[in-house]
Image (spheres, grey):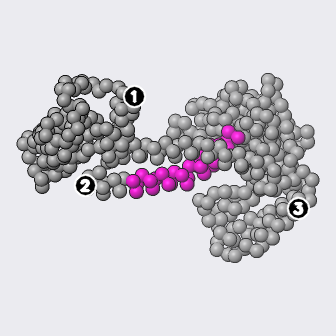
Amino acid sequence: MKKNRIFPAVIYFIFTFGIGVVFSLTLPGYFASFTVPADVVAEALGRGDFVTGLVLTEPVGFAREPALKASFEGGGGVILYEAVMEVFDRDAVDPDETADKLTHGMLYSCYTGFVYGMKGRYDVFSTQKNGTSLKVTQANGREITLPLLDYDQNGDGSNDGISNFLQSGFILLEIRKEDVSSIRSLAFTDRTGEIAFTASPEEDLTFESEFYDCFADMGAYNELVARSARGEDTAEARNAYVKEVKEALGAAPGCEVTAASAEYAAAAKEIGRRANQKAIPFIILYFVAIYIIADFLLGTHFIIRFFQWFLFKVCKIPRKGQKSPAKGEVFGHDYFSTVTLTLDVAEVPEFNGSVQIKYTFGGEEVVFSLLKSDGYTATQRLKAGVYVNPFIDIDRTYAPLDLPENLEVEGYRMEKTIKIVKREV
């Protein structure tokens, strides 16, 4: 590699390898957080493993027995579980400014679950006045409408569809105690606003059960979180509450701490495995690509030289326009010749770079280094014969006009002049 290319090569490799390291550290986590879990949930729902789907929504704890489970004519259904979730939003505003809202680290009670097996039979996408929603009828007969749509395709400010349903074929449901006081029935409307299907529990769901009792005094815990956000030290009291909840869930039949459940451990392991399967090929291809680019633009063209060697030496493919030596004396004479190569730079007076011209003979490489200080002339003592596989290392702005495909070395002294011209843009 020429000296004037060493610095750009160092900068290139530092920059590209730095990006590669970032990819290596972040891509598995990205896939594990944003793409793989939805696939694992969809597969779990497809085989009826609803608890695995539930734990991947990462509640703090849940009750194993469904609070509502209904099947629909033609397949699919809806399922809800008792659960307590933690707010995860590090960008949440100061709790002093939103006293009536939850902020990062606070807990809330909900019924959470899925609509599954309805892809192709539940029309929820529309960019014009989409009426898709969940209507919850409470025990007192009052109806509350909750949103289901979560993405805006055309950027008009109104949501047009449900992302998980579009990508993975299920809808994640979460009905919070802050939104409804009880659940008597559910009605799902489609994009036209018409009811597409309904479901009802055997008894009204009222956010009262042995499971929810395990999280007694949740309001006091959320106040501790708010105080902590204001800079007060509440760690000891918060840890004590967490310990009490874990002990209570352990003593309540059918209740689980999500992180300690067998389903969560198995699902997390599977997600990690799939995330690596997605990330590793991309990372390998990235590093291969940056090496190929460097070899062509900054390096010594090892890739080109390898293929030249493989095609012309191993596979014995004749070069285009290659002529067989016409003079028998070129072969079979064990003598050496003094060979001088000279560059004619008359047409490019501004040219001042160094040039290397390489040939191979008998599996060995011969290099002519032509420098301005030497008048672009170099001499080698070579064994008589035909030297092949020419390669010139020169500033890409310039090119040789008549570099021989086969350098026939014969006689005791020979000279060859190679004209250098500027490449056409």
The residue singled out by tag 1 in the image is: 315
Q: Which mark is residue 4?
A: 2
Residue 336 lies in the magenta stretch: no
For badge 2, the amino acid type reads Asn
Residue plotted at (15% across, 44% down) = 338
Prevailing secondary structure of the magenta residues: helix
Between the C-alphas of marks 1 and 2, the distance is 36 Å
Residue at disc 1, secondary structure: loop
Displayed quadrant of residue 37? top right
The front one of 389 and 296 is 389
The total of numbered circles placed on residues is 3
Q: Residue at x 59, y 42 (%)?
A: 278
The residue that label 3 is drawn on is: 248
Q: Earlier in the sequence, mark 1 or mark 2?
A: 2
The C terminus is located in which quarter? top left
Give the percent coordinates (x, y) of residue 26: 55, 53
Q: Nearer the viewer, mark 1 or mark 2?
A: 1
Give how far across and how far down residue 38 sits, in percent: 67, 41
First in residue order: circle 1 vs circle 3 = 3
Judge the density around disc 3: few (<14), some (14-19), many (≥20) Cα neighbours within 10 Å.
many
Residues in magenta?
13-40
Asked whether the viewer can see residue 219, the reply is yes
User: Which one is in front in this view, the residue at disc 1 or the one at disc 3?
Assistant: 1
SS at badge 3: helix
Look at the numbered discs 2 and 3 and tell me whether their residues touch, using CB distance below 8 Å: no
Indicate the amino acid at tag 3: Ala
Horizontal arrangement in the rendering, residue 209 relative to residue 372 (left or right): right
Q: Position of residue 72 (x, y in %)?
A: 81, 28
Q: Mark 2 vs mark 3: which is more N-terminal?
A: 2
